[in-house]
Amino acid sequence: MTARDPAGTDVGGGLLRRYCDAMRARVGERADSAIGVVDARMIARYARAIGATDPIHYDADAARAAGFADVVAPPNMITAVVDWGAGAPESELGPDGTAAGTAVPGLRIMGAGDDVRVLRPLVAGTDLVEERVVAEVTLRHGRSGPSAFVTFAHTFRTPAGEVLTENRRTIVVRPLPEDRR
Amino acid sequence: MTGAGDDRPVAGAQPAELVVVPTALQLFRYSAVTWNSHRIHYDPAYAAAEGHRGVLVQSHLHAALALRVMTEYLGPAWRVTAFGYRIRHPAAPGDTLRFRGTVVEADDDHVRAELTEHNQDDVRCLEGTVELERVEPERMDPEHGR
């Protein structure tokens, strides 16, 4: 463990090590899910939530005039949606509100960043499939304690296989404050 | 400036910064439209229990705002083809967040820019890069979204 915890007795650090071991065992694991058709209303709501005012996000005629087939999503919308479906019943969510398989007792999760290639913009009416692969797990020891960085490789494509966006999404996982474990 | 005009961006250009003071309402709507039920974004007591000073701006919202600096500068004839970013410091409602872009490479149909976000204490919250490509109107294919 860390210099602060040479004997490895730190409860949070132990939890984090076990989490890393479990995630490393899943590297390469792939899950595919059908997203379905992304509609103009969702695109407009996303644009509204980020304060984007360009009519290409709200008005099909404006989007067509700019060369798009229909209203177009802001560039990171496709990477930002946590759940494209109904989501799990509340009783199946973790204490932090995230889905089972994401939430881990004793640990806290935050988004750390993305590395994205956009091959084609997302326009309303597009039918999407998402592939997700557990790509990489790194345990780092910083001044504020240990952190695990977990990277997932996401591919968003049409059912026919045309790729719109590829994303390597990284989350950071750290122990909860001691009194909350 | 460029905008919708014929002026092309040049290396070193700095678009107008985007200043955003996020609100709890904005975070709520962002979580709603992304179906993000993570309580750190809307439950202040829970966020405090995780050791945060308030509910936190979603990482993707940081990025969406940073990207707006370049997409609004260049206009819809320019399409984002790649971007990457890391969150370096959290942000909460009430923070004054300044998003800036600097063009580091530019030619007739390609721009690469660096993106930053700083809070009211000049702490860097986000750093990243974005690449954009200019699409000539005659090359746009409405059947394929561009």
Image (tube, rainbow, N blue to C red):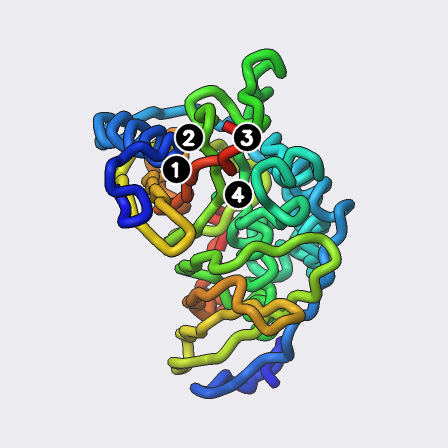
User: Are marks 4 and 3 in one subunit?
Assistant: yes
Q: How many marks?
A: 4
Cβ atoms at labels 1 and 3 below 8 Å apart: no
For disc 4, the chain is A
Q: Secondary structure at mark 4?
A: helix
Query: Which amino acid, mark 2?
Result: Val
| Location of residue B113 (image quadrant) | bottom left
Marks 2 and 4, the one that precedes in the sequence: 4
What residue is shown at x 27% (from left), y 49% (from top)? A3
Determine the CA span between mark 1 and mark 3.
40 Å
Query: Which amino acid, mark 1?
Result: Arg
Determine the CA span between mark 4 and mark 1.
15 Å
- How many residues crowd mark 4 within 10 Å: few (<14), some (14–19), many (20+)? many
Marks 2 and 1, the one that precedes in the sequence: 2
Q: Secondary structure at mark 1?
A: strand
For disc 1, the chain is A
Look at the image and tell me in which quarter the N terminus of chain A lies. top left
Cβ atoms at labels 3 and 2 below 8 Å apart: no
Cβ atoms at labels 4 and 3 below 8 Å apart: no
Cβ atoms at labels 2 and 1 below 8 Å apart: yes
For disc 2, the chain is A
Query: Which amino acid, mark 3?
Result: Arg
Query: Which amino acid, mark 4?
Result: Ala
Question: Can I make out residue B146 in this image?
Answer: yes
Determine the CA span between mark 4 and mark 3.
28 Å
Residue beneath label 3, please? A180
Residue beneath label 2, please? A129
